[in-house]
Amino acid sequence: MEAIQKEYERLNKRANLSKSIKDVDHCLRLLENAREAILRDPTTSKVTLVKLQQAMSTGLSKVQDDHKEIYTGLNRYGKALDKTFKAASTYSTTDYDALTSQAPLIKRAIAMHLIREGQFSVADCFVTEAGPIDIPPELQQEFQEMYEILDAMRTRRDLSLAIGWAHQKSVQLEQRGSNLEFELCKLQFIWLFIELPDRAMAYARREFSRFQEKHLKDIQQLMCAFLFLQSPEKSPYSRIFADPEKSWNDVAHSFTKEFCSLLGLSAESPLYIAATAGAIALPTLLKMASIMKEKKTEWSTVNELPAEIALPPGYQFHSIFVCPVSKDQTTDSNPPMMLPCGHVIAQESLQRLAKGGSSVTLKCPYCPRESSLHHAKPVII
């Protein structure tokens, strides 16, 4: 991937068409000037065209030279892609494609991603061209409000809109166990404490009273910071005010998360998460595809990956269960089953133990207790 990044940066530097545009404009001016000269004095047309031919030849050569660097950069970038993903064709197959029959879901994911990213005009254009997409019409208005609030926070350092929204949604936020409203008020206090300490005291007296029951300790620390106003470097509470920029970013992220949660959506775009997870998994899958091609084998289990993919914790959303007997990951068709003793194995492993049928007595592979197939219960993870 480093080679691709390097060639991309080089292409980005070379892909500057401003010089080429200037040269093209120069050629156009030569043509216009020649036309005007011929109109003024038609007897000089031959001389004018000869001069024009020489000047145009030089101008067009410059345009071609301008494009050479771009073509060279594109060529090298394409070669880097082909070299890095040379095994891509070996993994391509039309035998099984989970997305073929899910075109409406893909379109919806793209439209939702554009709306969540604040690209509202692009989203409208996509919906118009892609056809009817099942997205609530009021959803775009909701995200427009979210981005207005975030813009006020990030560009103007104005928390009034965010605090007003959190106060309006305080009941729903409280049910979720969220501290967003207090965190916003706390950040407002920190900002005032750094810039205008007198106003910070008045703000604390006016706003913090309703948070005392739940956040008394935090409020006490904020108030005690006034004791070290003249010597902040000696304050034991200096860490609270040490990095206000990080506090702004953290609160903005929390606001986005809670806003999306109240809409029944995840904090991150599912399309972005899926694409990123796929990019992380791609090198491993390509390597496995290359190995299978060399050994002339195929991966026949379409519901499972041929290798374990180590995704970051932020990309792990569902618990999985690996059968301790077969070492296979359970699926919808092979769910985990709990025996009366409490041990859990996969359904296929359980069926292999009970070869004689559901009434046959079988011994748990991990303890001496005996049971039968019909005593096992499926485990929902």
Image (cartoon, rainbow, N blue to C red):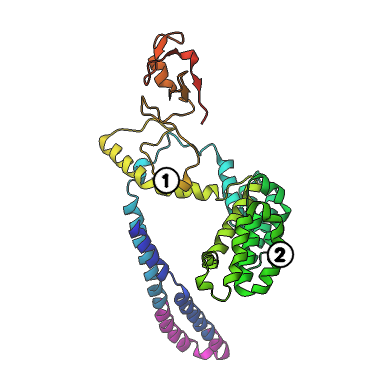
Q: Looking at the picture, does residue 67 appear above or below residue 163?
A: below
Q: Position of residue 319 (x, y in %)?
A: 48, 36
Task: Say whether residue 64 is magenta.
Answer: no
Q: How crowded is the residue under tag 2: few (<14 C-alpha within 10 Å), some, or many (20+)?
A: few
Q: Secondary structure at mark 2?
A: helix
Residue that numbered label 1 is attached to: 311
Q: How crowded is the residue under tag 1: few (<14 C-alpha within 10 Å), some, or many (20+)?
A: few
Magenta segment main secondary structure: helix
Hey, which quadrant is residue 295 in on the image?
top left
Amino acid at dot 1: Leu
Q: Name which residue lies at 51% across and 31% down.
A: 381
Residue 12 vs residue 238, the one in the foreground: 238
Q: Looking at the picture, does residue 17 appear above or below residue 364?
A: below
Residue that numbered label 2 is attached to: 205
Q: Secondary structure at mark 1?
A: loop
Marker disc for residue 139? none
Q: Position of residue 327 (x, y in %)?
A: 36, 29
Residue farthest left in this picture = 295
Residue 364 vs residue 334, the one in the foreground: 364
Residues drawn in magenta:
35-60
Amino acid at dot 2: Arg
User: Spatial distance from mark 2 to mark 1, Cα to Cα?
Assistant: 47 Å
Residue 257 vs residue 192, the one in the foreground: 192
Q: Name which residue lies at 67% across and 49% down.
A: 173
